[in-house]
Amino acid sequence: DIPSNDGFRYQIMSEGNEHLAYAYILGRQEGVPMVFSDATGVDGGRWVDDYKQDNLKAMVKFHNGVQGADEEVLYTDQ
């Protein structure tokens, strides 16, 4: 709820970076991710019903679909 707390607003990511963060988090096997949604309409309604966006619905569907499957590293540069 960073957008709702003035002391943390400097940590708000660009929409593109926020999308990449969701892709990373929802692409992971562990945990139960939560998508932020804000009904107050702060910042022009950027997060109102965010979980209803097609791209986020697809990411959640992917996350749920691979739940319990093994993860495999396909590439690393280290």
Image (cartoon, rainbow, N blue to C red):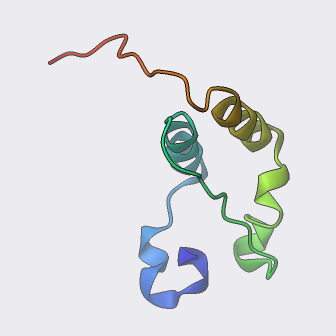
Q: Left or right: 53 with respect to 75? A: right
* Res 36 → quadrant: bottom right
Q: Residue at x 75, y 73 (%)?
A: 38
Q: Left or right: 57 with respect to 13? A: right
Residue 14 drawn at (x, y percent): 54, 55
Residue sitting at the far bottom: 6
* Res 58 → quadrant: top right
Residue sitting at the far top: 74
Residue sitting at the far left: 78
Residue 59 drawn at (x, y percent): 69, 36
Q: How many marks?
A: 0
* Res 8 → quadrant: bottom left
Residue 62 higher or lower than 46, as above or below = above
- Given residues 7 and 76, the one toward you in this image is 76
On the rendered image, what quadrant is the N terminus found in?
bottom right
Residue 63 higher or lower than 73, as above or below = below
- Given residues 62 and 30, the one toward you in this image is 30
Q: Residue at x 43, y 69 (%)?
A: 11
On the rendered image, what quadrant is the C terminus found in?
top left
Residue 65 drawn at (x, y percent): 70, 28
Q: Left or right: 31 with respect to 77? A: right
Residue 45 higher or lower than 68, as above or below = below
Residue 28 drawn at (x, y percent): 49, 36
Q: Left or right: 57 with respect to 10? A: right
Q: Residue at x 81, y 67 (%)?
A: 48
Q: Residue at x 25, y 16 (%)?
A: 76
